[in-house]
Structures are given as C-alpha cells and as structure tokens.
Amino acid sequence: MKPMTDRNTIAAVSTPAGTGGIAVLRLSGPRALEIAQSVWRGRSLMDAPANTVRVGEIVTSGGDTLDQAVATVFRTPHSFTGEDTVEFSIHGSPWLQREVLARLLEAGAEAAGPGEFSRRAVMNGRMDLAQAEGVADMIAVSSRAAHRLAATQMKGGFSRRLDALRGRLVELASLLELELDFSEEDVEFADRRRLTDLCSSAGTEVKRLADSFRRGRVLKEGVAAVIAGVPNAGKSTLLNRLLDDDKAIVSDIPGTTRDVIEDTAEIDGILYRFIDTAGLRDSTDTIERIGIERANARIASADILLWIFDPTSPMPLQLSAYRETLSLLPPDTPVIRVLNKADLTSGGSVSQADIISGVSVTQADIISGVSVTQADISSGMSVTQADEAIIPISAETGEGVELLLKALRDAVTEGRDLSADLIVTNARHYDALRHTASALDRVGSALAASLAADLIAQDLREAIHHLGLITGAITTDTILHTIFERFCIGK
C-alpha cells in the first residue's frame, strides 16, 4: 500500500467488474479537481461547489469524446476520504471503464490499491478503523441481520461504546501513573475501591462483547444448519421445504442422498445455510460410506444441528445414531430435535407426539395422538439435551414447520432482540477483546492482593492498548496493511 504524500492522487473503478448500466470511477487526492478537469469537457469542475453534480464529456488527450458522463464533486474535508474527490458516472461498458481509468492515470493519477480510499478516510479522521471494517461488511451483507450489524458498526455505535470504556480506563491509569511519579511519598491518587468496581464492570462488558462473537459470526456469514438423521427420515424433503425449491432428490429408497447438498435461505432476516447430509448408518457401500464421512465432517462444524426422527423406523437405531452424532458437535451447539412424518401417524394430525420416556430402548415407540407433557428421549442411556422438546412436523405437507422456523431463530438469537444488542462480528475485534478481558482479570487479581501500583498499571496499560487496537487509537502499519488488503479496489 502506497503511503499518502502531497503528490499522491489515486483513481480506481468503484463499481464491480463486468457490464452494467452505469460504472463509477473515483478520483481522490490533492490534485483530484485538476486531473478531473484535464479530462473533462463541459462546465468547469474547478469552481464547482462541494457536493454538486455537473454533466459533460470525458475526452481523450486528443480531444475526442470517450463518453458522456456525470461528475460529482466533493471538497475537503467533507468527502468520504477527507480529500478533494471527484466521481465520474459513465456507461458501464468494461472497455469504457478501462479507457477512462487509463485516461485518468495518463493525466497524473495513480492506480489505487485495495481499500486505499477507506484507508485515507481513516488516516484523515473521517472514520475509525472499526467503522472502516463496517464499510467492508456492508458491501458484503447477505441478510437483514447482517445489514443491521454492519450499519451499527459503520455508524460508530461499536466504537463509541469502546471509546467510552477506554476513556474510563485511561483516566484511572493516569492516576496510577501519577502515583508512580510520587512513589517516594507513599500517596494514592487512584481510589482502589473505585478501580476495583470499574475493573469488574469493564471486565463484564468486555466479556459480554467477546461472548457475542459466535452469534455475530454466524449472523454475518450465514448459520450453518446441518440436517441429519438415519436414512429415509425425510431430510431431503425438509431441505426442499425450507428452501421452497426441489433442491434435493427425494425417494423412498434409503440412502438416496450420498453427498452433501447445501443452499441458503433468509428466514426472519437471518441467512441460513441449510446442509442436507447422507443418512447415518453402518454401510458396506463404498460411495455411501464416503457420503457418511462427509456428513460427519459437516456435523463437526455445524452452528445448529437439526436431527430428524422417523416414526416409521426402529427407534433403538435412531437413538444410537443420535447419541454418536452429539459427540461430534462443537461445544454448546444448539440441537433442534424434529419428529417428521406427522402425517403418517395413526392419529392423523399430531399435536404433541413425542418419544415416550421411562421405557426401555427396545420398547421405545412413537405414540401418536397423545399429549405428552415432559416427553423425552430415554433409553437408559445418557443423552445430551434430553430435556429439550421435540417438534412434530410433516416435511411433506408443511405441518409444524412454522414451529421449526421459530426454533431456528431462537437458537440463533438466544431470545434476544438483535436490534437492541451490540454484537461483535469481526475476528480481529474478538481477539483484542479476549486480550483486554485477560488483562482486566489480572488487574482485578492485583487489586485484590493489594499489589504495588506499578504492577497494576502495567496490566491496565495492556487492557487499554488492546481496546485501542480495535478502533485504531493504537495501530501499526502492519495492522493497517492486513486490514485494508482484504478490501476491494475502489473502496
């Protein structure tokens, strides 16, 4: 990434590659107006007021017209980058985009690197580092929930919370540093009770933010919901129902699905990646065994497991497969247990049909048409999450699917209002928060042990340092390069 200099004005195509109705080329830097004027035929851009639009033509060095264009002028410091900026809107031909960019470079601009406009916005104080990362997230959003999280970060909601927290820590750290200057006089400027209370409250807030990362990651990237069960339980039928599409082949022949089938759907503003897997059973078929191995691999990285019970198949085998599957899951992975084929039970519509507890595994059966209050899976075995309810559905008819959709949302939101919650979505922020929490824990232990001010100050400085890394209050060229190299050129 090129450093900013007085002579460095950059240009790039800001719209995605390919043909479209309109393409936008951005020019930013101290010579932006001068360079833009040199390729322009029409009313002068040099005297254009800030935030104004002018219509004209972009011309070659010989004066021939390249394209009709609209030029939008932004003046320092009130632009995205904080510099003089001109944006040309031209027709979206890829050839025209290349030619106009080449013309700007010929006139004295330099080609922008990945994320260079956003980096300049950070360096010129138009936004902080966390907000810039919010811009990148906004470009990549694929659901309403991800959009809300990116918008909150881009507008500075996350940064303001961290800046307020960091400000309180800096205030107390400065008092501790003052004590060190007067160490020979044995005075205390920082009230230890206040410092203990602040350390405790700050640590709680930092840990809450760090703990939100798992939920934030899946909201940002899409929730990996793996559908698993024994062969012919109706997994593919359920996938098709959730996607409202015939994505998977459905057959009465057990083992039809031999590979992982995946597609996405947005439900209540949350993007889910539904993953249909091969039926889990012992098999001598080489291809089917490969499918089962792939199923187990996807289960091991699932964000949510949808386990499908089949009332028409032997229950002991299903319980055994269910227990083995639970052992593959990452810790604390939500499990939604589904009783499919409610339309095939003898009682017709099943309101609370379940697997009855208190009987041996050989006697376990599906009792249809019976209301079971605390029904459970029980076979004399220890089954994780055995106290959770089973949702009766018919993937074929759609009966009960609304309850399943509610369970999917609750598993992601944990019953919280996403619009009112501040959630961490960035792995870099998560890592910094973990280090901050660890440093604050050491501060708390040092205070409890009445250790010297210099030892407390050292850990407090570390906590402040890691919080500052998130917003860019403390940064290095290495961190900046690592962040902005992942941005698209033109942003």
Image (tube, grey):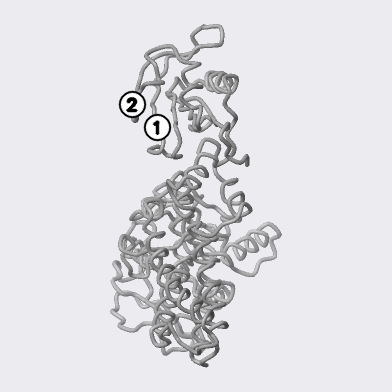
Give the farthest residue toward the front. Answer: 185
Which numbered tag is attached to residue 49?
2
Residue 438, quarter of the rendered image = bottom right
Alpha carbon distance from label 1 to label 2 = 8 Å
Q: Is residue 438 above or below residue 85?
A: below
Q: Are marks 1 and 2 in contact (CB under 8 Å)?
A: yes
260 to 307, vertically: above or below: above
Q: Secondary structure at mark 2?
A: loop
Quadrant position of the N terminus in the picture? top right
Q: Is residue 343 left or right of residue 131?
A: left
Amino acid of disc 1 = Arg
Q: Mark 2 belongs to which amino acid?
A: Pro
The picture places residue 131, in percent across and down from the top left corner, at: 44, 52
Q: Does residue 229 show up?
A: no
Q: Which mark is residue 75?
A: 1
| Quarter of the figure with residue 267 | bottom left
Q: Residue at x 50, y 25 (%)?
A: 19
* Left or right, 460 with reference to 406: right
User: Is residue 427 placed above or below 358 in the rendered structure?
Assistant: above
Q: Which residue corresponds to the image point at 39% horizontal and 14% vertical from the top-left?
A: 56
Residue 320 percent across, percent down from the top left = 56, 78
Neighbourhood count class around disc 2 (C-alpha, 10 Å): few under 14, some 14–19, many 20 upward? few
Q: Nearer the viewer, residue 345 or 375?
A: 375
- Percent coordinates x, y for residue 225 in the rendering: 48, 61
Q: Nearer the viewer, residue 282 or 101?
A: 101
Choose top left, top right, bottom left or bottom right for residue 405: bottom left
Q: Is residue 350 visible?
A: yes
Crowd rating for badge 1 (residues with CA inside 10 Å; few <14, some 14–19, many 20+):
many
Image coordinates for residue 22, horizontal then vertical, percent = 43, 24
> In this picture, is 459 found above or below 102?
below
